[in-house]
Amino acid sequence: MLENPTTRRSFLHRTSIAGAALLSPLALGQQKPEEEGKENSDEKISPAEDLMREHGVLNRILLIYDEHLKMLTEKHPFDGSILASAADIVRRFVEDYHEKLEEDFLFPRFRKAGKHVKLVDTLLAQHKAGRDLTAKIRELAGTATLKYVSTDSEKLADALRSFLRMYRPHEAREDTVLFPAFRTVVSPHEYDSLGEDFEKKEDEMFGDEGFFKVVDQVAQLEKRLGIYELAQFTPR
């Protein structure tokens, strides 16, 4: 039996529309921006990339420290709880997690390979100095709340200044020298495996999506301090 051409054309037209609808973003369940971000966060990242993005968190905290140092210099009252919270994130995320990864997984391998040993020694000494400064900043932050005791405010300003002066070159040297060289002291398989180990450790300490939770905590402090909007740093 011959098929009616008109009927056949109508069928093809209807099926092509249905097919297009199935392939449309709405039919596929177009993701919201936050869902896209979560999906992208599930992608594997290398150990060096993981460590470098954590430096981004540290840099945002350094801006919080900058702002408090400015207020101390200008004798402008501030809520010390913001600074104390920032120091707590440094202790938990930077020192107890990020730097511990470097000390346990990177530094020993560079020493074993005989590469950048002097740099590693310096970085390790700076980790120790940083922990001492963080303890001092955390302790003095409370005394600076809405008042100025001369000796305490001077000590706090000195601690912030020392932390800022040390950590900017510290992380810059790691990003440009140590982390790029890490591939040369481990096998490709070990390098990839360490990336997975870093992610597991992060989840253990901070829960699922731990990095993004810490980023959000820093953002909340920036908002309270009035330095969250990126546009304000653009020269006029």
Image (cartoon, rainbow, N blue to C red):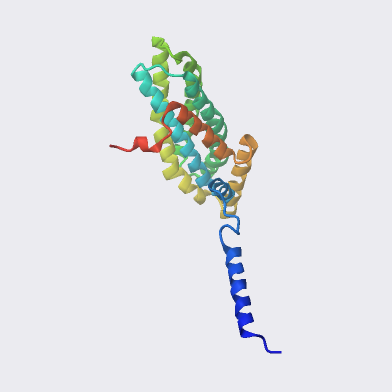
Relative horizontal placement of residue 42, taking residue 80 as reference (left or right): right
- Which residue ends up furthest to the right in the rendered image? 1
Q: What residue lies at 46% left-to-right and 15% top-to-bottom? A: 145
The quadrant of the rendering that contains the C terminus is: top left
Q: What residue lies at 67% left-to-right and 86% top-to-bottom? A: 3
How far across and down, in percent of the image, does residue 107 sit? 52, 39
Work out whether 165 lies above or below 155. Answer: below
How far across and down, in percent of the image, does residue 210 sit? 59, 38
Q: Foreground residue, 39 or 46?
A: 39
Q: Foreground residue, 32 or 88?
A: 32
- Which residue ends up furthest to the bottom in the rendered image? 1
Q: How many marks?
A: 0
Relative horizontal placement of residue 236, taking residue 231 as reference (left or right): left
Q: What residue lies at 56% left-to-right and 53% top-to-bottom? A: 187
The quadrant of the rendering that contains the N terminus is: bottom right
Work out whether 145 lies above or below 104. Answer: above
How far across and down, in percent of the image, does residue 231 sit? 37, 38
Hey, which quadrant is residue 76 in on the image?
Answer: top left
Q: What residue lies at 44% left-to-right and 43% top-to-bottom? A: 175
Relative horizontal placement of residue 184, taking residue 200 as reference (left or right): left
- Which residue ends up furthest to the left in the rendered image? 236
Work out whether 22 lies above or below 103. Answer: below
Q: Foreground residue, 211 or 171?
A: 211
